[in-house]
Amino acid sequence: MSDFAILGRTVGPQHPEIQTFLRQARDKQARVLCLCRHPGVPMYIAAVGEELIVKRMPNTGKDHAVDCDRYELPLALSGKAEVLGQAIIEDPASEAARLKLAFALTQGKPRQGPSGEGTSHHTVKADPRKLTLRGLLDYLWEEAELTLMAPGFVGKRNWGLVRRFLWGAADAKSSQKFQLRELLFMPAMYSPEHKDRLAADRERAFAAAAMAKHKKIVIGIVKSLDPARFGGRLSIKHIPDAPLFLDEKMFKAVPKRFAAEFDLWRLHENSHLITIATVMQMPSGILSIDEIGFMNVTENWIPFQRNDEKELIELLTGEHRRFVKTLRYNVLPAAAMAFGLLTDVDQQGTALFIVPHDAKEAVRAEFDHLISSCELETWCWDASGPRPALPGKQQRLSAPPGRQALEYRPNT
């Protein structure tokens, strides 16, 4: 991870006093600079509880070095291109982003079915003017920099860390009259000795939402989907005492609508199934799902949508490669899109493509067009045949250029 410049100091991200330095910079309303490139890329400071974290400014991901942890995919490779400026309106000057959502936030009559994450099967992309539930999850996942994989990240992420990054990603984001942090509920890591406090925090959050007549957006790890006396019950890890309930129609529809996600989850036992749902607390106290979406992620929390994607992620991870995974946002699975960007090869990276083994001719033509028009070096695997060799790895590019960092390196 690149060093920071904080109030004239060059500071490594693991320095034991970095929180002190960040508080001093925040008090002076000073920008932090990422030193992956000279003279530095401006960043801002966000609070997650009592901890301060450094976040990239809106629309500046491309300004970071390609192998910097804060680098963002070129828009030409990402589904974000379809919604940026319409469903996502970012303001680099104020660090804020305004989101237009395709699902209701205020409490009213519940919808009688699963979320419309790409509900139209007659088009390759949903309305770019509003984010679907899955589109919102993709946005937060990318803003939290959870699409980036590097050798040092293997086995280091858990739900507590993922949750912290997602909270940071939600900073300065709003929709309608609500701040996104006000809407989100992501359970803290469960521990039996703190179960009463955790239950009280949850009940207080949902009671406040009910009082304000808005829904909560719940993000968590699926544990099981089971029949209930009426409808179904979705159990979320780290909330053992508060399942989310689905009405009968939704319970029957979800396994059909999200059959691919549930099949991948069953097949890959080391993976996680993430859910995002709008949830209301009913007068009886139960938590009722209004709309819902799902996302498969690897054990290292990198999203995938097909077996070939999972295979390539595991190969890249096992070979200690650095890469960034693309996300679709509102673009439906039928559309051709890059798999990601390999960032340990040269100054621009190599765009990676996977053509599904069962892709029809029209989709193959879309891939051919994407690859031929890509301004980067490309690598393509037609999953109906053998996988070609990956580009060779080069030495890390963005080492600080001759600066003496005020760094704490406990492993040296």
Image: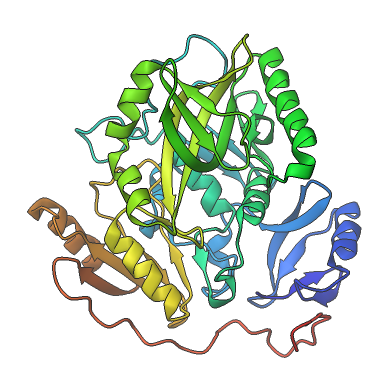
Q: Is residue 10 left or right of residue 240?
A: right
Tell me which corner region of the image, top left, top right, bottom left or bottom right, holds residue 340.
Answer: bottom left
Query: Position of 404 compared to 142: left or right?
Result: right
Q: Please state, as top left, top right, bottom left or bottom right, where the N terminus lies in the image.
A: bottom right
Pick the residue in front: 145 or 241: 241
**Residue sitting at x 68%, y 87%:** 401
Residue 270 place in picture, x, y as percent:
44, 59
x, y percent for residue 120 = 26, 30
In the rendered image of this protein, does residue 206 appear above or below residue 170? above
In the picture, which quadrant includes the C terminus? bottom right
Q: Name the spot of residue 228 as percent of width and height, x first.
A: 44, 22
Quadrant housing residue 175 = top right
Question: Looking at the image, can residue 132 be seen?
Answer: no
Q: Quadrant of residue 240?
A: top right
Q: Residue at x 79, y 82 (%)?
A: 410
Q: Is residue 24 visible?
A: yes
Closest to the observer: 14 or 252?
A: 252
**Residue 84 drawn at (x, y percent):** 46, 44
Total marks placed: 0
Image side of residue 261 versus residue 394, left or right: left
